[in-house]
């Protein structure tokens, strides 16, 4: 019994580590891109600034979508066989979770109103907004879970 539990925990730990192995590479590349796109280092108006911002935009996608990366990575790591099917099912499950979460918050009246005042918060980088193709809005999932009928503008 103890061996089964320990073995299951080891498999889960390995499946979590797999997506993490690629993150240091992304971090190092983002640091290099940050230097390349800094006008005080490469000069004002340098074409390297545009290249750095272009590459950085692509790299930041990995860090802003860690939830789906871990979802797929854990599913593939835990699957003994048919890893591709497990990854596809994990993507479907994640998208279902986003849609169901959006629907539940709409039905219960807890969905944050994305008015012009909220755009001010997004521009101040208090919250990161992510628009999915199906029209649901995921705004740093902790907001959904912690801000219940709180006037967010009283915080500031």
Image (spheres, rainbow, N blue to C red):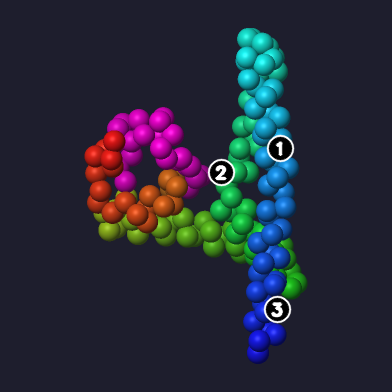
- Left or right relative to 64: residue 104: left
**Residue neighbourhood size for the residue with mark 1, other residues' Cα within 10 Å, grouped as few (<14), some (14–19), many (≥20):** few
Residue drawn at point x = 41 percent, y = 58 percent:
101
148 shown above or below 27: below
Q: Quadrant of the N terminus?
A: bottom right
- Left or right relative to 122: residue 93: right
* Residue named by callout 1: 28
Q: Residue furthest right?
A: 81
Q: Earlier in the sequence, mark 2 or mark 1?
A: 1
Residues shaded magenta:
112-134
Residue drawn at point x = 60 percent, y = 44 percent:
63
Judged by depth in the image, the label closer to the viewer, 2 or 1, is: 1
Residue drawn at point x = 41 percent, y = 30 percent:
123
Secondary element at image label 2: helix
**Residue neighbourhood size for the residue with mark 2, other residues' Cα within 10 Å, grouped as few (<14), some (14–19), many (≥20):** some
* Residue named by callout 3: 7
Secondary element at image label 3: helix
């Amino acid at each position: 019994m103890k061996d089964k539990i320990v073995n299951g925990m080891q498999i889960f730990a390995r499946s979590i580590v797999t997506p993490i192995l690629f993150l240091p590479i992304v971090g190092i590349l983002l640091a290099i891109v940050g230097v390349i796109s800094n006008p005080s280092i490469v000069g004002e108006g340098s074409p390297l600034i545009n290249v750095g911002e272009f590459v950085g935009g692509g790299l930041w996608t990995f860090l802003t979508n860690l939830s789906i990366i871990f979802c797929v990575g854990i599913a593939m790591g835990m699957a003994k066989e048919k890893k591709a099917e497990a990854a596809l099912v994990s993507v479907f499950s994640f998208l279902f979770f986003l849609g169901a979460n959006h629907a539940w918050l709409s039905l219960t009246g807890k969905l944050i109103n994305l008015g012009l005042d909220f755009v001010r918060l997004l521009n101040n980088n208090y919250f990161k907004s992510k628009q999915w193709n199906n029209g649901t809005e995921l705004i740093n999932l902790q907001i959904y879970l912690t801000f219940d009928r709180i006037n967010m503008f009283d915080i500031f």
